[in-house]
Amino acid sequence: MKLVVVGNGMGSVRMLEHLAEGHHQHDIVVLSEESSPGYNRILLSKLLAGSIDRESIELKARHWYQEHGIRLLSNKCHKVTGIDRTLKQVKTVDGEFYPYDKLILATGSRPVSIPVGGANLQGVMFFRQSGDVDLMLESARKENAKAVVIGGGLLGLECASGLVKRGMSVTVVDTNPTLLGRQLDGTAGEMLRSELETRGIAFRCGARLQQYLGNQKGWVQQVEIINDQSQQEYLDASLVVVAAGVRPEGSLMQSAGLECDRGVMVNENMQTSDPDIFAFGECVQLRDSLFGLVAPVYEQAQVVSEQLLGRGSKGFVPVPIPTRLKVDGIDLFSCGEFIAGEGDEELLVDARQYGVYRKIVIHNNRIKGVLLYGDVSGGQWYQNLMLQSDDISSFRQQLIFGQHFLPAA
């Protein structure tokens, strides 16, 4: 059976591992527009910061693919530009055609571009690929280098931290008044901001991006914003990194006539509207859900591999995944609804002077949401109690301190 895989990211590599372990009998071709073999995108921030080397992010060396009967074609010329579902073949930039019996699409996501003036200036970039790290390091080596990071989410904060460690002056601009606004409340967000400020990162929260301004050579020079005081402000910048979120990369699927909404639609077996075409990862949509974390993508990779190996599968079932983050060494955990509503109660430990904040939201003696900052012990236990809707009334007084403080049974 001819198997063509489009994309060689973390999910694709995990799927190929499962196929190799299952002693597959497929003729496999992997097409990727990136020149390097599969690597761990999650570690790019550490690579930027200089805490690991490039070899540390590599998932599989090229010889691994060869040893397992997998043909890896990775270069810009191998970018897939079209799918002919009638002839069952894909076409690449260089005009080559690759026939398939089964096609696997793992095209990932694309960064959100903010439509403002100057977006095409040199020095304005995204942070998605290993090559982006090289460009940022080159910029950091310049004298009096200054960076502006657009976006105060996880990627933006990790990028800012890495650039500061490389000697750059860095300012983060975010529309949200709270850092990591989807994962933290106001208190935890302010604790995080204060800690990162001590490490040299400046912030403009609650600000609106207006435009990028460049010099006569076409390089970015300043970023114009409206700050939280509704005042116009100009931030000097020799580098701008846009980390304002991502969207599913579904242009290839749309042009092929596959059913798409925000992402390409799949069923629990990760099949698209064409039963011979599977898709998984950040490019897919299952009912109303999109997937941006690695855990569900790995589960989807296993479902696809089991289908291809003929083993059948129970299918992919989305489950709530807590947010576990480590921002520049600061541990964070959140799950559920951690902002109290009507009829809810809050249990709090506010020890911000020691870098610790714990919050549990309860409704009818059941956990509704959890937020942990600094000390994230017990996070999984809290999540299990929440998912199982366990009554916590018998150990309510000890709950905020964690499982280890419960009385012996």
Image (cartoon, rainbow, N blue to C red):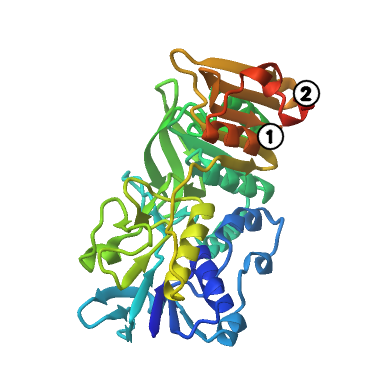
**Image location (x, y in percent) of residue 340:** 49, 19
**Image location (x, y in percent) of residue 100:** 33, 82
- Eyeballing the image, is 283 above or below 328? below
Q: Which mark is residue 407?
A: 2
User: In which quadrant is the N terminus drawn?
Assistant: bottom left
Q: Which mark is residue 292?
A: none
Query: SS class of the residue under badge 2?
Result: loop
Furthest residue toward top: 343
Query: SS class of the residue under badge 1?
Result: loop
**Image location (x, y in percent) of residue 403:** 72, 30
Q: Amino acid at mark 1?
A: Gly
Crowd rating for badge 2 (residues with CA inside 10 Å; few <14, some 14–19, many 20+): few
Q: Amino acid at mark 2?
A: Pro
Crowd rating for badge 1 (residues with CA inside 10 Å; few <14, some 14–19, many 20+): some
Question: From the viewer's perspective, is 40 left or right of 198?
Answer: left
Question: From the viewer's perspective, is 292 left or right of 285?
Answer: right
Looking at the rendering, which quadrant does residue 202 occupy? top right
Pointers 1 and 2 in contact (C-beta within 8 Å): no
Chain-order first, disc 1 or disc 2: 1
- Eyeballing the image, is 339 above or below 247? above
Mark 1 lies on residue: 378
Residue 9 visible in the displayed image: yes
Q: 122 or 341: which is nearer to us?
A: 341
- Eyeballing the image, is 398 above or below 63? above
Q: 81 or 271: which is nearer to us?
A: 271
Residue appearing at x 68%, y 65% in the figure? 56
Question: From the viewer's perspective, is 286 left or right of 349?
Answer: left
